[in-house]
Amino acid sequence: MVERGVSFFMPGLSNWSRWGPEDELGTANYITPEVIMNAARLVRKGKVLTCAVPIENTGPVFPTRIPPQHVMTRTGADFTAGAKGRGTIPEGGMKSSDDYIYMGLQSSTQWDSLAHAWYGEHLYNGFSQNEIKNVREGGARRNGIDKMCRQFVSRGVLLDIAGYKGMDRLPAGYAIGPEELEACARAEKVEVQSGDILLLRTGHVPWFYQLEDKRPWLEGWGGIGKATVPWLHAKQVAAIAADNLSVEVYPPEDEGAYMPLHCVLIRDLGLTLGEVFQFEELAADCRADGVYECLFVGAPLRVTGGVGSPFNPLAIK
């Protein structure tokens, strides 16, 4: 049996059993009713900004995943060619179009569930890795994304690290540390608080759209470094999202490691990660009015047993 409350990756950093032995929400528990009510008071001008990339087959996606495929199954051309409408409405009856999307649940702007990454034989809060089944048996029976379908309505705080550094984007392998996060927050006159959803702008996703040859985009990106993990734990951040492919820096700081911070953040802390966001509209608005906080609404799709979910995150100011 694994000992509850012990991190074997970063000793001393663990949220196992913090909210009870059956908890499957992790740091989303920091989003209390009071946090939500305070976040709602941040809406002052009724402006809604999306933080999602377009869902399309030419968009940014992690190299191990298939880009979304959007298929039209009925179009106006079908009726021009002689297809019949339905019912007795004049001019040929009721006509309709229809379409499908075939995509990985993490092939666009998305949340990772707490069943997405781990090390050893246990998921967040000590659940066995064998709780992740095939779809016929329920998929992720523990820590699935469906457990989060009411979460992630909270105060969003944009930390525009690329803007603070005076860069269009952070270079590959640039590890963001806690001192830099604090300095950026001071410059923006905002303070990270318990229950916040941290929105981290690195400039990596916008760079994708500027490149003709996309290969350099996959070679690496700036993101949080391992020194930031204790800071996130101490600040009681509810979730963190970034405009890169993994939130964490890549290549990683330690040679030979692969996504090490996914292991400690998701498995040990129960901290949900959001990837492939776009913050250009939000960052421009924050620079214009000097306000780097918002009501953030980011509920995932209720996919039973899913280990991730695409969604349309909204920043409301």
Image: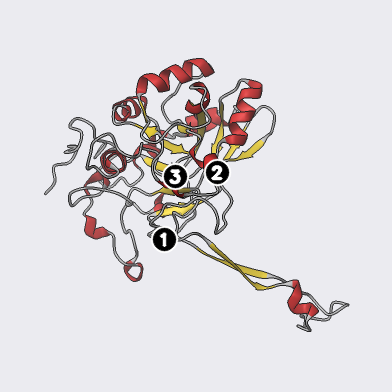
The residue most toward the left is 1
Callout 1, which amino acid? Thr
- Would you name the residue on which mark 1 appears? 304
Amino acid type, label 3: Pro
- The secondary element bearing badge 2 is classed as loop
Question: Label 2 crowding class (10 Å Cα cut-off): few <14, some 14-19, many 20+?
Answer: many
Q: Quadrant of residue 238?
A: top left
* Residue 98 rendering spot, x and y as whole percentages: 66, 70
Q: Nearer the viewer, mark 3 or mark 2?
A: 3
Q: Mark 2 = which residue?
A: 313
Task: Return the disc, 2 or 1, that comes first in the chain's sequence.
Answer: 1
Q: Percent position (x, y) of residue 95?
A: 77, 74
What distance separates the C-alpha of mark 3 from that of mark 2?
A: 27 Å
Q: Name the residue that disc number 3 marks.
A: 216
Tag 2 near tag 1, CB within 8 Å: no
> Measuring 36% from the left and 67% from the top, which residue is drawn there?
135
Please name the amino acid that badge 2 sits on: Pro
Mark 3 Cα shell of 10 Å, populated few (<14), some (14-19), many (≥20): few
Residue 97 lies, with reference to residue 178, above or below; the image says: below
**Foreground residue among 276 and 114:** 276
Q: Earlier in the sequence, mark 3 or mark 2?
A: 3
Q: Residue at x 33, y 25 (%)?
A: 231
Compute the Cα span from label 1 to label 3: 36 Å
CA neighbours of label 1 inside 10 A, class few (<14), some (14 to 19), many (20+): some
Sequence-wise, the earlier of marks 1 and 3 is 3
Q: Position of residue 110 (x, y in %)?
A: 47, 49
| Vertical placement of residue 187 versus 152, above or below | above
